[in-house]
Image (cartoon, helix red, strand yellow):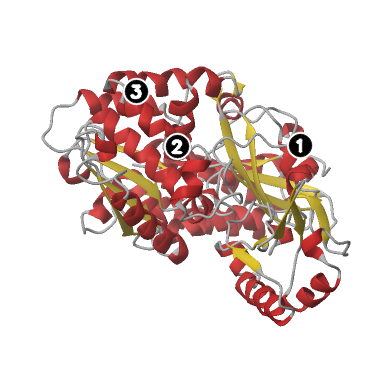
Amino acid sequence: MNTPSGFKVWVPCDSAALAMDADEVAQAIAAEAAKRSIHVTLLRNSSRGMFWLEPLVEVDTPLGRVAYGPVEPNDVQSLFDADFLHDGSHPLRLGLVDALPFLAKQERLTFARMGVTEPLSLADYEAHGGWSGLKRALALEPMAIVQDVLDAGLRGRGGAAFPAGIKWRTVLQATAAQKYIVCNADEGDSGTYSDRMTMEGDPFMLIEGMAIAAVATGATRGVVYIRSEYPHAVATMRQAIELATNAGYLGDDVGASGKAFHLEVRMAAGAYVCGEETAMLESIEGKRGIVRAKPPLPALSGLFGKPTVINNVITFASVPVILARGADFYKNFGMGRSRGTLPFQLAGNILHGGLVEKAFGLTLRELVFDFGGGTRSGRPVKAIQVGGPLGTYVPASRWDEPLDYETYAAFGGVVGHGGIVVHDDTADMAQLARYAMAFCALESCGKCTPCRIGSTRGVEVIDRIVSGVNRPQQVHLLRDLCDTMVHGSLCAMGGMTPYPVLSALDHYPEDFGIAAPTEKAA
């Protein structure tokens, strides 16, 4: 809250806001305040995930933070003229941030601090519950920590949704002089950004989650593998690791427990396939990112052949709240075997693109229309891709089904990393299917034939279908090819590329010129 000595104004500093001139807005506020001899304390928070409002400027008031946005540099003078520091009326005034419907309807567990704190302030992190989970973990036996994660029902927040606690238990029970914790932050899926937001906006949360995993499994070294296209995330994580080490939360004596955990950042190799866990391990080891055959599993023979826990950013970031508040608290959210919350990411042709953290069980219709406001173009929604570029295109008949792992698996869908990309009725689904095959051909590591050759042939077959060359036979050939890729590929790169292809073919056959529409736009 503001004090007699000055006003607190918050301007976000993460990539989304910076792309919309947040730095220039901050500089304009500082300059205008100086010009008017007003003492303003300018603080840099992270984005709250309402990207259509960036840069979102917040002012502390006795009632809470009041938001103005989206603010451009040339709006700053009029904000001061309207006395926005005293909650003055202005066309850009949005009201109390916490009361904005987009935020108020969410269940923010993992993202509770996002936009509230300064990302690199240890004091802020501690004041908002930071390190509580690690401190509790240090007082428990390793198996008790693992049991908490198992009881919470936490599953990997990536593609496979494998129970995190089972991985941790396997590494704990493995005998080895050296064990590793590896965070897969090579966030390459289209329409996803929750990993980036976490690393730029609440980096200590990721560090705490990885440290808890280390204490639970006996690992003493860790790596955060961050995609090279995320320079701000790389820089923020490196600073956060240094600060956490100096404060005793990392290093030779974690929390004065006598246990060591050293953490470092590695920049990714710029290949989509390095998001596959074994290709990532190859890359970290300094080799070409090529998928390894399994077994052995990374939990037994991972980084440099040692037992390794591999989870993605949101999985590790979900751990501190589980240890701090208990497994029962966490598993109270969600449905079935999908427990807790997931940060869903709205992208594509969407009016209100941004991050929505909700418990499993809401529907696509709620996400896209209630939160997202429908399409940006104003046209009807035709298809929604869920789960990244290898996810299925979900037709209107499935938009009211609950978003949980089992429900989606039952009809061949994937929840994945929670990325949601919206397409309106102008989208050509045949061309989107072709893109999936072309993307696989470009990004394949080349190790297995179904992925390397199948994707190349897939592009050719789709081209023949669209051009009307012996269409029934080519459709049969495409389905046969997809079956080979699903069952014969070494990893999900080739194994899941057929998902968007077949879903486009099944639900939007008219775009391939082969049938009347079976789904109507909504």
Query: In the rendered structure, which disc, 3 or 1, sits on the residue that comes first in sequence?
Result: 3
Residue that appears at 72% across and 58% down:
59
Q: Dot 2: what SS?
A: helix
Circles 2 and 3 in contact, beta carbons < 8 Å? no
Task: Measure how far apart labels 1 and 2 are at the Cα level.
Answer: 24 Å
- Where 235 falls versus 448 (above or below)? below
Q: Label 2 is placed on what type of residue? A: Thr
Quadrant in which residue 369 is drawn: top right
Question: Is residue 445 depicted above or below 317 in this figure?
Answer: below
Q: Along the line of sight, which residue is nearer the eye, 456 or 406?
A: 406
Residue plotted at (50% across, 37% down): 129
Q: Viewed as shown, does residue 179 lie left or right of 389?
A: left
Q: CA distance from mark 3 to mark 1?
A: 34 Å
Is label 1 in a helix, a strand or a loop? helix
Type of amino acid at the residue the image marks with label 1 = Glu
How far across and down, in percent of the image, does residue 399 sit? 74, 35
Identify the image quadrant of the C terminus.
Answer: top right
User: Which residue is labeled 1 in the image?
Assistant: 366
Q: Nearer the viewer, mark 1 or mark 2?
A: 2
Residue 206 vertical placement versus 413 (above, below): below
For mark 3, give the secondary structure.
Answer: helix
Which numbered disc flags the more N-terminal residue, 2 or 3?
Answer: 3
Mark 3–mark 1 contact, CB under 8 Å? no
Residue 384 image offset from top left, x and y in percent = 69, 45
Structural crowding at the residue carrying mark 3, measured as other residues with C-alpha within 10 Å and reported as few (<14), some (14–19) or many (≥20): many
What's the distance in space between the residues labelled 2 and 3, CA to CA? 14 Å
* Residue underneath mark 3: 146
- What is the quadrant of residue 7 in the picture? bottom right
Q: 10 Å neighbourhood of mark 1: few (<14), some, or many (≥20)?
A: some
Residue 449: x and y in percent read 34, 49
Q: Nearer the viewer, residue 49 or 298?
A: 49
In the rendering, which numbered label is found on residue 315? Answer: 2
